[in-house]
Image (tube, coloured by chain):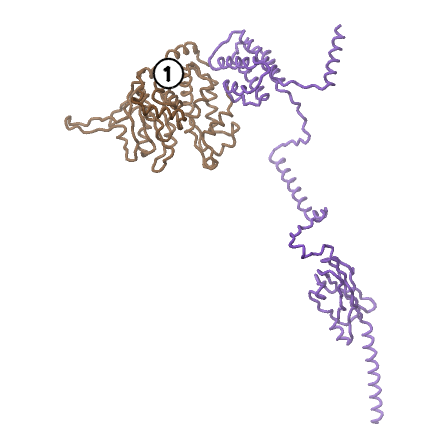
Amino acid sequence: MSIKKHIQQTLLLAVSLILFGFQSNSVAQNVSVSATMDSTVIFIGGQIDLKLQLSQPDGLDLPFPLLTDTITKNIEIVRLSELDTLNRENGRLLIEQNLRITSFDSGLHYVPPIVFEQAGEKINQLVQTEAMALMVINPFEEVDPQKGIMDIKKPISTPFHLSELYKYLPWVLGIILLAGIVTFIILKYMGRDIPVKIFKKEVPVIPAHERALSELDKIKQEKLWQQNRIKEYYSSVTDTLRHYMEERFEIRAMEQTTDEIMDSLKEINFRDVKSSDNLKQILMTADLVKFAKHEPLPDEHDMSMINAYFFVNQTKIEEIKSLEEEKAAMLSKENEEAVTE
Amino acid sequence: MEQSVDIKAINERIKEESSFVDLLTMEMNKVIVGQKHMIEGLLIGLLSDGHILLEGVPGLAKTLAINTLANVVDAKFSRIQFTPDLLPADLLGTMIYSQKKEEFIVKQGPIFTNFVLADEINRAPAKVQSALLEAMQERQVTIGETTYPLEEPFLVMATQNPVEQEGTYPLPEAQVDRFMLKLVLDYPKKEEEQMIIRHNLAKSFPKASTILKPEDIVRARQVVKDVYMDEKIEKYIVDITFATRYPEQYGLEKFKDMISFGASPRASISLSMAAKAYAFIKRRGYVIPEDVRAICHDVLRHRIGLSYEAEANNVTSEEIISEILNQVEVP
């Protein structure tokens, strides 16, 4: 009986050992890790992703290696992503982790195999990725200490891209909307009717002498002194001349007295010396009329008007006509003469 | 409705009455070298019955000028040196007890004269200043229960020293306003100073002759009042005064915060009177805008109150007046 029991126990042990042996072997064979890089070449300081993947049967809890800030002394880890389970088909899991790496040393760097130490201990097997190489290129000139101390280079300006403004777009739209609402409220409730003129019609510039001459014509037609409105007549004539002088000679004639106006005009070379004398006659007569109740003779009224016309005509800026305008003027004159004949 | 004015008749009267102007100026010039503006100002004050505030450093012939004027007009003159311990009674007079008569008798002060030089008026306390200024305005002084009218013509010329301000009592704006003109005196020119040296080192100092009597001045004042001032000139004066009060209405927004108070209606009256006197001096029976402009600075410079902002920006009342004259339309 004891022999039979011993045989049974031995067989049970053998079957158990066989079964256990198969199982551990199958687990070992079904766990695999890999590491891949986006690129094997980067510029100095450039960043790439290194992807760690662990393929394992469902139900196993295999930890990833605890990486901190470097892989080697030349390769730094910028950012570590969370573990991400990608696939649950066929009872297997694919777990992934991304490492953003960079390097600030140029040259070909060796990326050693990343060992899943704790996972390996659990399944009693060496679990590690393949070794890789990373080429780091320095695009800048090598610093030559022999050349001496150099200035720090200025920041390199990057090209502007519209996408940079996208983040401000909601703010801009918000401000425009707010301004629109405020304007609407002001116009609607404050009763302000503000006409918006985008295209303003250009007002033709009338030369100073033309305006002065037409004003003098108007005063003449009003026949003021004939109606015994002598003060008004002289005030209008002198005001017209003072406005004309302000525009023509750029002097503050409206705020100046007769003496001051004559002083201001001293530096101006008149074509005809009489212009200054004529102006003085008008202004002095006007002063006497306006401030001393002087009543000039009718001839003096006419003389003042003639002198005013003379002053404007003698001091006006001559218009320079183009050759075409001269020709057109001559032709129209000839035509007029032909018609009258 | 305009009054009927015979300008020709006024002109004739002015020609007659103003004949002393040249003589007076000539006599004054015998003694005073330069300072033509001060002499002209004195004459305007005398003819328009206004008082004068003089500002200038010591030694610019202020006392000599008014003394000479008193000599030329054959008028009485007193000089009062204002000091911190001066009392109103020292100026106006007081009642003293006469043991002989066994009653209080009135002892009139130095103000009972034709021309008063109130030297360094800002050195006396406010009560003395106001006693003088009240007498200037009312033309009479009350001592005890009796009121005594002051003599005619009565002209006060007060001086202020612009450099020594320590221990002084600056005149309040309301009292400064009582002075028709404020004249600012400057140093004489080189040639004038040379002449002053010669005058003072000569064996006999030149002396002005008496050519006028106080009654002549009183009569001349009547003629000055008759000088014709057109409505347009009146409007011009009002515009100038208003521009000191509301500069923004005359295109001078920049002065809005720089003027704390503008010229008073008394300034308009003084401008009119002084312009008339100026026209009289120029032998004209009517006022023209030039007359107003000629006296504008002297009449207005002490009547415009400057704000702290103006002082911070170094803007003076002179600049403000010049800008106003450049901005207000001349009729």
The residue shown at (84%, 85%) is: A14
Between A252 and A292, the one lying in front of the other is A252
Q: Position of residue B321 (x, y in %)?
A: 46, 27
Q: Quadrant of residue B126?
A: top left
Chain of the residue that carries numbered disc 1 in the rendered image: B
The residue most toward the top is A341
**Residue A53 percent across, percent down from the top left:** 78, 66
Q: Quadrant of the N terminus of chain A?
A: bottom right
Q: Is residue B254 left or right of residue B56?
A: right
Considering depth in this image, is B29 or A297 the residue closer to the camera? B29
In this view, the residue farthest toward the front is A146
User: Residue B259: where, in percent of width, then height?
Assistant: 46, 32
Name the residue that disc number 1 marks. B21
Relative to A170, is A189 above or below? Answer: above
Image position of B186 (left or right of A238):
left
User: Is B286 placed above or below A101 here?
Assistant: above
- Residue A321, located in which quarter of the rendered image? top right
Label 1 sits on a secondary structure element that is: helix
Residue A312 % position (x, y): 60, 15
Amino acid type, callout 1: Val
In this view, A103 is above or below A15: above
Q: Is residue B136 left or right of residue A312?
A: left
Badge 1: few (under 14), some or many (20 or more) residues near its Cα, within 10 Å?
Answer: some
| Chain A drawn colour | purple
Task: Tell which chain the image draws in brown.
Answer: B
